[in-house]
Amino acid sequence: MDDEGHFRDDDHMCFGDEVCADNDTRGPNNFIREQNSIIGTAADKVADHVNDAGHTAKNLSNKFYDIRGKDSSFGGAGMLENLRIKSIVSDTHKPQQEYKNCDGGIGNNPAAKQKCLEVIHSIVLHHSGDHSCCKHKDYCTYFQIKSENPGWSEEQVQEAYAGETLRFGGKYMDLSEYGIGVLQKEIKKRFNKKILTNWPSC
């Protein structure tokens, strides 16, 4: 619209074909719908919402702090501490970058997308001492040690892992199954197959 509320002509109108924001789809989708209502059918299925990794990381961090603030069972030593929140959010970054730089590019490499999801969805469990979903040696020292020493007992693997990892002195987050589930829900809401199709653009 110009200053008088009239539609601009074709030489002065701009079209947003990519709305880059966090992975809350409401605002971007409202923008796309409004733009479409102005332009008409020529704009159908042209504009798309893509995710901004920085905003998503900040929102995830804020949500974890909010969860801890509202439920005291997440607080205290060995629980959802500040450094643990920072580490969990930071751990989502590397698999995203690997997926972004994969052969074929974003949305064109199903194996790379699957690996990214597997790594991110295992992060909360990994921090809680449950490595049952850790499947990649380049992301989990525990899984690497266990894979390279198939004859070792669980105690031997844990001892070797504690000796090699520098983070948190080898100590795990001490959340209940319920607590782990709450954090897992937030992770999976922000990182899923649909979102990763266009992840990350900005």
Image (tube, grey):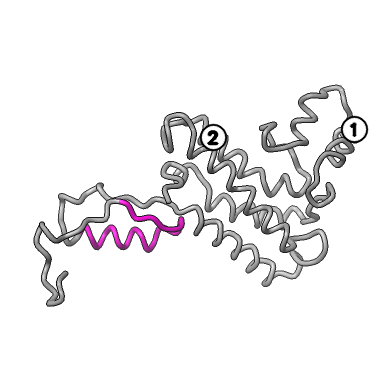
- Residue labelled with disc 2: 114
What is the magenta range?
A: 18-36
Q: CA distance from mark 1 to mark 2?
A: 30 Å
Image x and y of residue 89, in percent: 62, 54
Q: Count residues near mark 2 (Cα–Cα under 10 Å), then give few for <14, some for 14-19, many for 20+.
A: some
Query: In the current view of this chain or complex, which residue is farthest to the top?
Result: 151
In the image, what residue occupies the spot 25% across and 47% down?
45
Image x and y of residue 194, in percent: 44, 44
- Residue labelled with disc 1: 156
Q: Amino acid at mark 2?
A: Gln
Count how many numbered circles sit on residues in the image.
Answer: 2
Residue 84, quarter of picture: bottom right
Q: Amino acid at mark 1?
A: Gln
Image x and y of residue 94, in percent: 59, 43
In the image, what residue occupies the spot 78% across and 36% down?
142
Is residue 23 located in the magenta-colored stretch of the structure?
A: yes
